[in-house]
Amino acid sequence: MVETVWKGTSKPSALCTFLLLILLCIFGFYSLHYPHSTEINPNAPNALRFRQIFLSSATNYTIAAYLRALTLHPHLAGTAPSLATVNYVVSHFKNLSLQTHTAQYKTLLSYPTHSSLSAHFTNGTVHDLSLSEPSKNDNGDDAAVVRPYHAYSPSGTAFAKAVFVNYGRDVDFEAIKELNVSVKGCVVIARRGDLPRGIVVQKAEENGAVAVLMYTEGEEVKGFERGTVMSGVGDPLSPGWAAVDDAETLELEDTQVLKRFPNIPSMPLSVRAAQIILDSLGGAPPPEIWRVHLRAVGPGPTILNFTYQGEKKVATIHNVFAVIRGSEEPDRYVLLGNHRDAWTYGAVDPNSGTAALLDIARRYALMMRLGWQPRRTIILCSWDAEEFGMIGSTEWVEQNLVNLGSKAVAYLNVDCAVQGPGFFVGATPQLDSLLLEVTKKVKDPDSEGSTVYEKWAATNAGTNIQRLSGVDSDFAPFVQHAGVPSIDIYYGRDFPVYHTAFDSYEWMTNNGDPLFHRHVAVAGIWGLLALHLADDSILPFNYLSYAEQLQRYKRILSNLLDENVSLHPTYKKKKNVSLHPLTTSIQELVSAAKEAEDEAKILRQQETTGDSVVLKKRALNDRLMLAERGFLDVDGLQGRQWFKHLIYGPPGDHESKLDFFPGVADAISQSTRMSQKESQAAIQHEIWRVSRAIQRAARALEGELT
């Protein structure tokens, strides 16, 4: 409740509070975080002044109101309650007089129908383990919370001994084999780590397990962590094309569809239920390297009776868009995106981001009333069905691939805007400089008198910008399939109520961000990034940062190959692999990036706005925008052709230590199954592919034909 957020104020009546929230949401004239608003002449469309208006019109009060409204009820994608959040976002955009539309897709989703779990102990007792979550969410609808499950898990039953496999990695299965422990015919218990859920299930199946139960550990963790076990992204019935009405759809029994789902059932466990099972195990003690407080790993003697029944069905999902048309370059798009669907109430994941997006819309609408119109078109995107595998964003990217390829400037993603303290960001490297500059303009939410940049730079990791090789939010289709420069922003990580019924408004107000100042900071950074990308006459891209990052990757790869540092447990030294193609192509990119920087400096200094200068800026901007597309390869990654980006993408071997050059990482992992000559040729081929991709990016930046 609002009065629990801002202490020291008199409690207003319910009617007054309601009316005040409506006025604030529409007009946004109440400011707590930036109290010193400046009156601006609406007839002076100055970019700097409008950025000041954007920052000064921030209010934690309205963001809190948006989040409260979004999280009143669970809103799992494809269900009737999810339509309430669709209508809420649509109404919000329309009430701000923004051009609003929706895009619907019919996609294959997955829901539970029945589950049960009991532990049979050696003394003859049977313990029925609870699979429900009494979240006690104030004003919430706990009865509508979906029971804990893994989306796309097959239905199945198991009556078998339990065995603990740590995180379920290859090294973990090897470790228990050394203890003469077999998981064949057993129900595997695994704790959640870095591996995707579906990969844990796949590895358990490969080792002969009949079912998998996963739990998330931690002192403050409670509830059941739901999630998907489907591999890949997007609708499984329309791989590579959009699931629009009357589109081609594969049959559920098609091998291309079935290979994306596991073959054995799985389900999440609570920490409490997992501990009951693990404390009863006998057999060999766990390896010391696991660092787990456990007497033994099993198998048994405890037997688990596990049943899961689910259904896969086609459901309609809804993406919502608000479009602010550009005045000079309406055919160039800056996209801000957040997914709206949640496993339960979704206060952190994802609606902290949704609330920030709605507040950005409010502030942009205020600026428009004061005379602002962006140079380029801004599109606010509210995705659906992300939790099932980035389905809403992927279908839209596939449907609009050609236009995105020729017109998208950048995609700015926020999923969980606020999970706790600490600023984190991921980006494609040409956006690094812009990120650093923008964070210098936004007040830090946790340190009085500091900027986000100053607090961020003072941390142990410094201004560490992560890269976007993961497949864990909606930036994935934009970067890894469409080659659009992208950013992903969030505060905090690893919050203890992730994907549980406890991810509620109450948790946010009591733990995540009681004063909603972190929400204000994320919205400030997010919206300010978009204003630069939409309004700067020359796009603020710096490809020298990209070239420096690639040079670093080349050094890491060189050391790994030369020093025989293992990327895979059975990796063998590759003496005859040459990195010379990489050296040459990176140098080409350095030269092209320097020329682009010099050209940009000259054009920025020219005061004239004649047609010649305008056309030169437009041409340079197009080259800056299109260079990222050069890193795409039409053939994609081997065995995973949907992933086209050869610099950033998920490796096929999720235990690979290489988080760049995914094709090279795959070749190294697969080399253990080849002769030395074949493996060297495969690795060399992937290095050549990366080199050609870098050359394509350099030539796009140069803009000249050979």
Image (cartoon, rainbow, N blue to C red):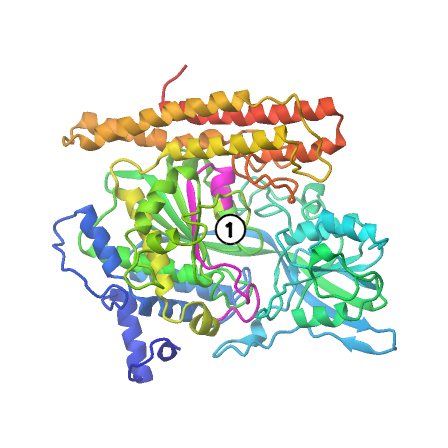
What residue occupies the far top of the structure in this picture? 706
Q: Nearer the viewer, residue 603 or 282?
A: 282
Q: Is residue 393 visible?
A: yes
Instruction: Pick the quarter of the image with the C terminus.
Output: top left
Give the quadrant of residue 15: bottom left
Q: Is residue 208 visible?
A: no
Look at the image and say whether residue 669 sits in the magenta stretch: no
Q: Is residue 97 above or below residue 5?
A: above
Q: Give the residue drawn at x 31%, y 48%.
A: 438
Q: Position of residue 702 (x, y in %)?
A: 36, 23
Q: Give the residue drawn at x 50%, y 60%.
A: 341
Left or right: where does residue 444 sit relative to residue 566?
left
Left or right: where does residue 109 sit relative to residue 173?
left
Q: Give the residue drawn at x 24%, y 38%.
A: 328
Give the quadrant of residue 518: bottom left
Left or right: where does residue 562 sit relative to residue 541?
right
Q: Secondary structure at mark 1?
A: loop
Q: Position of residue 357 (x, y in %)?
A: 37, 57
Find disc 1 in the rendering and name its residue.
Answer: 473
Instruction: Pick the quarter of the image with the N terminus.
Output: bottom left
Q: Nearer the viewer, residue 508 or 371?
A: 508
Q: Nearer the viewer, residue 54 or 339?
A: 54
Left or right: where does residue 295 sit relative to residue 78?
right
Q: Give the residue drawn at x 50%, y 76%.
A: 140
Q: Amino acid at mark 1?
A: Ser
Q: Position of residue 637 (x, y in %)?
A: 60, 33
Q: Is residue 102 above or below residue 32?
A: above
Look at the image and say whether residue 501 sits in the magenta stretch: yes
Q: Which residues are magenta?
A: 476-505
The number of callouts visible is: 1
Q: Position of residue 381 (x, y in %)?
A: 41, 52
Give the quadrant of residue 358: bottom left
